[in-house]
Image (cartoon, rainbow, N blue to C red):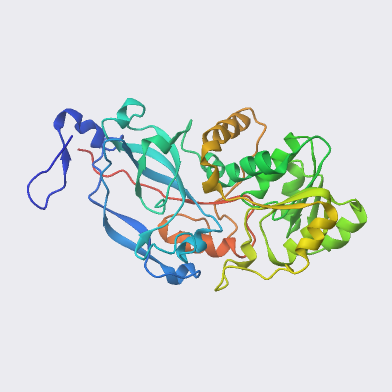
Amino acid sequence: MLRLAAAGARAIVDMSYARHFLDFQGSAIPRTMQKLVVTQLSPNFQEAVTLRRDCPVPLPGDGDLLVRNRFVGINASDINYSAGRYDPSVKPPFDIGFEGIGEVVALGLSASAKYTVGQAVAYVTPGSFAEYTVVPASIAIPVPSVKPEYLTMLVSGTTAYISLKELGELSEGKKVLVTAAAGGTGQFAVQLSKIAKCHVIGTCSSEEKSAFLKSVGCDRPINYRTEPVETVLKQEYPEGVDVVYESVGGAMFDLAVDALAIKGRLIVIGFISGYQSPTGLSPVKAGALPAKLLKKSASLRGFFLNHYFSKYQAAMAHLLELHARGDLVCEVDLGHLAPSGRFIGLESVFQAVDYMYTGKNIGKLVVELPHPVSSKL
């Protein structure tokens, strides 16, 4: 239903649907916006990504929403994306950022059957590190309000939920080891395992994180800076652990393999310790792995969220329900304790990524994108 104005001017919609192309607060949607763009491939986020300030605000198609982003999520794999590791055929420049939450400020005619201007939505689609993002209505997730807590579920929460449900085979009394347990996705693995009535062990790197883990039900937090994880597991869990939710890689992966019980299951959802290296990997003792798995009838299972999108909507619905009932804590880290202070504005995405790799965040790292209301029409 779009109609072009004079040459060089912005495309406008037929006036009968013009309300779909106004900011819901009655302000004009600007012609240009800021966004982050990968301009060269590198796992060094600072080198790979450029903040561009005069990009045209995209127009939604018939089945699309234009979302004004209010909060965007930081993921360890942002640097895998900036390094071109997910799709080597894609060449720079390309947009970056996996997830966002904000308000619908414009939408196509077909999309207006289910959504309205001003509605709060969350989404997972590349290009969230921008002031405005076009989101297909078919993948948008309606949320009660624009709160960063809902953002934590989109990738971090669903990764834990789906992987543990599909691959973890959790049942009452099983022992579950969660590495990086106080991080964005670890916090969910801990709580979901407790909901399944498992005994949960969580590794972390500070007393503050250990206290947080206790607050969300972790039975045995292990601060690896003060206690050797291997020693604790051998002494306190001599029979081994039934499930490992592993996101660190390297030496922690090796330790987790050795800690598996008979018929134990190790789920690899990441290996953050290697992402900053040129290969994206951290060395593991793979030579003995077949023998170790065979000896215990154990299994090693990889999980990549993109392969499980058929389970995604149901997972999000259940997580939202758990949170609404007060049964799920969604811890958000907006950078209050970061050296540069709270993460506000797209330029602070760089600091937030750096902060993630210091390992100091508790919960999900989130950047706020404030939007001053422009002059009224």
Where does the image place residue 153, in percent across and percent down from the top left?
Answer: 56, 41
Q: Is residue 77 visible in this depiction of the protein?
A: yes
Q: Position of residue 123 (x, y in %)?
A: 45, 42
Name the outermost residue toward the left. 6
- Residue 177 visible? The answer is no
Instruction: State the residue at coordinates (82%, 41%).
Output: 174
- Compare residues 189 and 50 and report the one nearer the observer: 189
- Determine whether, in the image, residue 189 is placed left or right of residue 115: right
Give the quarter of the figure containing the C terminus: top left
Q: Position of residue 198 (x, y in %)?
A: 79, 39
Q: How many marks?
A: 0
Q: Quadrant of the N terminus?
A: top left
Residue at image coords 76%, 63%: 289
Does residue 283 appear left or right of residue 346 in this picture? right
| Residue at the spot 74% in from the left edge and 47% down from the top edge | 213
Q: Quadrant of residue 207?
A: bottom right
**Picture coordinates of residue 268 (x, y %)?**
66, 54
Occupied quadrant, residue 110: top left
**Which one is nearer the viewer's eye here, 26 or 258?**
258
Residue furthest bottom as drawn:
278
Q: Is residue 260 left or right of residue 282?
A: right
Q: Is residue 294 above or below residue 150?
A: below
Which residue ends up furthest to the top in the rendered image? 113
73 sits left or right of 359 in the view: left
Q: Nearer the viewer, residue 108 or 55?
A: 108
